Image: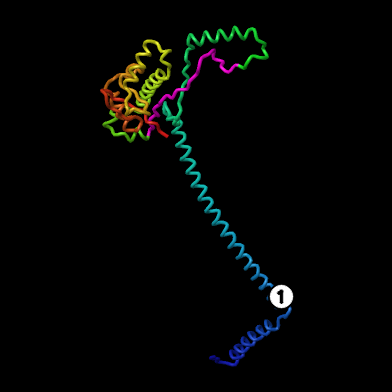
Amino acid sequence: MNATSLDSLAEHFQQKLDVVNTIMDFRCADEDEEKSYQSQVISLQTELDSLQVVIALMQTEVNKQAMKLKETQSMKTEMETLVSNLNHAVANIPARMPKPAQKEAAVEIKDKPSVATTKTAQSKKSTNQTACKENQPPRTNQSGGRKQKNVYIPTLEYITVEEFENVPKYIKGRMNYNQVNTMMDEINKAYKEKYKVLAMKRTTLSDVNRKRYEKFKLQESKETTGEHFIVDEDVKEFSHIKMDSVYRSLMTLLRHCGRLKEIRGGGHTRYACVEIY
């Protein structure tokens, strides 16, 4: 304190007294009001704690929803890819689709009734005309005396696009996918016609089919037991395939893809059908 006069000293002390009076005013505040302020502060603190808990819970839920959103976006991307692939597949369906392997692909061969069977049937008919309808036995054959027999017909399964693409270029040459499966249809015709003839009874065969039957039997050997095969002559007779280099490439491709196997011997090259399960 550097007072130069009594007035400045008095002014200084007056300022100090004003400060003391102000402090005393605050100190003498109502105790009830002070308690009220304290309770409000405690209440605010409690609410703040509750808000912190709520905010923590909301943050956890936000994180969960963010994870679900990420999963949903991933699913959306997968679905868009799937739809795109399906649209591509629909727009590029092959002319021929591989069929499920059928172990018993069969056709019905109907045999003509023999003369003896016809006479026996006529005799039974004349006898039954004199009998009562109640005593007539039930008919078990509705085909007029003809027997139906199921015959196994070997069928080559179509080559898939993936298989065709994995075939080396030197094997498939200039053949395209549809051309391969179209030619396989013709080869399957040869299998079908051959084994239809072999399924017939020799007594019902025409002269042409009898010669075929005997020729087919001569081509069989011990190595062909249990196998279903054709030879080049069958393909030439029963299909529209030309016996050229494309045909040779096709047979090589089918062997490469496991649809055929060769059985040689006796001057014949046999192409046996390989069943796929």
Q: Quadrant of residue 177?
A: top left
Classify residue 12 as left or right of residue 171: right
Q: Position of residue 60 (x, y in %)?
A: 56, 59
Q: Quadrant of residue 165?
A: top left
Give the magenta-colored segment's residue range.
139-161
Colouring: rainbow
Classify residue 203 as left or right of residue 62: left
In the image, 214 versus 249, the foreground residue is: 214
Around disc 1, counting alpha carbons within 10 Å, would you say few (fewer than 14), some (14 to 19), or many (20 or more)? few
Query: Judging from the image, what secondary structure is the residue with disc 1 in?
Result: helix
Q: Main secondary structure of the magenta part?
A: loop
Residue pointed to by mark 1: 36
Q: Residue 148 lies in magenta, yes or no?
A: yes
Numbered disc total: 1
Q: Quadrant of residue 58?
A: bottom right
Q: Residue at x 55, y 91 (%)?
A: 3
Q: Quadrant of the C terminus?
A: top left
* Placement of 219 over or under 68, stated as above or below: above
Q: Residue at x 44, y 33 (%)?
A: 89
In the image, 201 versus 63, the foreground residue is: 201
Q: Position of residue 77 (x, y in %)?
A: 48, 44
Q: Residue at x 28, y 23 (%)?
A: 268
Q: Position of residue 20 (x, y in %)?
A: 64, 86
Q: Amino acid at mark 1?
A: Ser
Q: Residue at x 39, y 31 (%)?
A: 275
* Placement of 211 over or under 40, stated as above or below: above
Q: Residue 14 lies in magenta, yes or no?
A: no
Q: Position of residue 197 (x, y in %)?
A: 40, 17
Q: Quadrant of the N terminus?
A: bottom right
In the image, 71 versus 235, the foreground residue is: 235
